[in-house]
């Protein structure tokens, strides 16, 4: 007996945990995508009603996209480092301050590369 009650190796258990984390993050990203779509529709309505200018509407759309990228980066950090959503966001914020760069730029880098090395977390 190897001390593994299921007869499976440590790697198989780690893969199962990683897949579960990815599934949770995928669901979160799907929900965020829905919110972004809703937000874009609301922006269009506000603009059609003359309540926001074209410039303001563009700024709101950019903010929605930025929020989505930050959310995706948080999900990547959660999956790679096995931390909570709050801890992942805190790690992003701290790295942003340390590197004197905008959080959205750091998030974009993480989403594009998949690398969390810039965070200096285990």
Image (spheres, helix red, strand yellow):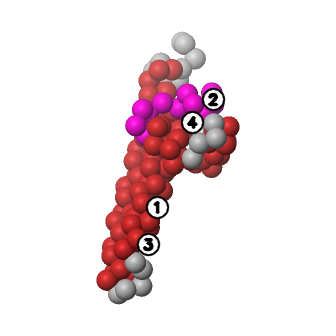
The residue under the point 42% across, 60% down is: 62
Disc number placed over residue 120 in the picture, else none: 2
Eye-nearest disc, 4 or 2: 2
Q: Nearer the viewer, residue 104 or 37?
A: 104
Estimate the spatial distance between the alpha carbons at disc 1 and disc 3, rounded to whole Å: 10 Å
Eye-nearest disc, 3 or 4: 3
Eye-nearest disc, 4 or 1: 1
Tell me the SS state at disc 1: helix
Tell me the SS state at disc 3: helix
| Magenta span of residues | 111-122
| Crowdedness near tag 2: few (<14), some (14–19) or many (≥20) residues, C-alpha within 10 Å | few
Disc number placed over residue 34 in the picture, else none: none
Disc number placed over residue 63 in the picture, else none: 1
The residue under the point 43% across, 40% down is: 111
Tell me the SS state at disc 4: loop
Q: Which residue is mark 3?
A: 56
Estimate the spatial distance between the alpha carbons at disc 3 and disc 4, rounded to whole Å: 38 Å
The residue under the point 43% across, 72% down is: 56
First-in-chain label (3 vs 4): 3
Eye-nearest disc, 1 or 3: 3
| Crowdedness near tag 4: few (<14), some (14–19) or many (≥20) residues, C-alpha within 10 Å | some
Q: Which residue is mark 4?
A: 82
- Is residue 73 one of those drawn in magenta? no
First-in-chain label (4 vs 1): 1
Image quadrant for the N terminus?
top right
Estimate the spatial distance between the alpha carbons at disc 2 and disc 1, rounded to whole Å: 27 Å
> Residue 96, image x and y in percent?
62, 42
Estimate the spatial distance between the alpha carbons at disc 4 and disc 1, rounded to whole Å: 27 Å
The residue under the point 44% across, 50% down is: 69
Q: Is residue 18 left or right of residue 91?
A: left
Estimate the spatial distance between the alpha carbons at disc 2 and disc 3, rounded to whole Å: 37 Å
């Amino acid at each position: 007996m190897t001390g593994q009650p299921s007869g499976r190796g440590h790697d198989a258990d780690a893969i199962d945990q990683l897949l579960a984390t990815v599934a949770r993050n995928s669901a979160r990203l799907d929900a965020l995508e829905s919110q972004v779509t809703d937000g874009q529709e609301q922006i269009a309505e506000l603009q059609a009603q003359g309540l926001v200018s074209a410039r303001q509407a563009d700024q709101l759309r950019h903010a929605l996209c930025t929020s989505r990228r930050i959310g995706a980066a948080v999900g990547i950090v959660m999956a790679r480092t096995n931390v909570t959503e709050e801890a992942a966001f805190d790690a992003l914020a701290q790295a942003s301050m340390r590197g004197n760069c905008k959080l959205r730029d750091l998030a974009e880098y993480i989403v594009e590369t998949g690398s969390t090395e810039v965070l200096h977390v285990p």
